Image: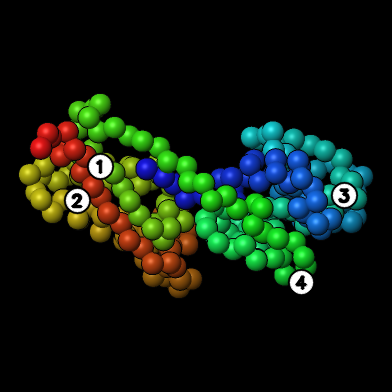
Amino acid sequence: MSTEFTPESERQRLQFLGFMQPHLLGNEFTHLEFPRRVQRKEVGKRMLYRDFTMKGWAYKTVEDEDLKFPLIYGEGKKARVLATIGVTRGLGDHDLKVHDSNIYIKPFLSCCPEVKVYNLMHYEHGADDVLVMGTDGLWDVLSNQEVAEAVTTFLANCDPDDLHRYTMAAQDLVMRARGVLRDRGWRITNERLGSGDDISVFIIPLMYGNRQP
């Protein structure tokens, strides 16, 4: 099993690399993260920030160095590394540079996947134990917790012997991620924006993995 890696989820790894090898930032970027862009008039004032050692935020006095563009900027789907790319692991992009500069993106991109192994034979599984596989159209708008709660609730209201229950649960997730068309576009719960990307979902029952051939 693996997960999507984004500038936000890999913030500390990226910041540590920027701290250890500042030449990769080309004197144009800072590895520190701030809640928003720092302005010249805020030099000498205190502002929240995060470094690679920090999970939460702390205060620091703004310096001239902090006026540089952040290594990681934006939130959610709009988060970018070096104001250029929205992913942090993958193959290729060897020649990709920051626009109008000689700063390479590749040193910050890892080609190493992070895979977690879940041994089906070590656990007993029931009809409601499943693995959810989805494209970023699903995960961009729904959290792991929201998906887990939605699937658990849906399957609990289905006949355990219904062979279509997993397909219907997947369709339910697609509809939740797409949302409802309103005056201000597609909206999901709490009036959040619905997914504008393609949405594919697979729900795979785990109970069959316990059975010996």
> Could you tell me residue 108's position as x and y percent?
65, 52
Distance from the alpha carbon under mark 4 to that under mark 1:
47 Å
Residue toward you, 190 or 211: 211
> Could you tell me residue 169's position as x and y percent?
23, 52
Q: Describe residue 140's horizontal placement relative to residue 13 as left or right.
A: left
Which residue bears the numbered disc 2? 166
Which residue bears the numbered disc 1? 130
Label 1–label 2 contact, CB within 8 A: yes
SS of the residue at dot 3? helix
> Residue shown at 48%/71% (left/top)?
184
> What amino acid is at disc 4?
Asp
Badge 1 or badge 2: first in the primary sequence: 1
Distance from the alpha carbon under mark 1 to that under mark 3:
49 Å
Residue toward you, 15 or 96: 96
> Could you tell me residue 72's position as x and y percent?
68, 52
Label 2–label 4 contact, CB within 8 A: no
> What amino acid is at disc 2?
Tyr
> What amino acid is at disc 3?
Glu
In the rendered image, the vertical position of residue 156 relative to residue 71, given as above or below: above
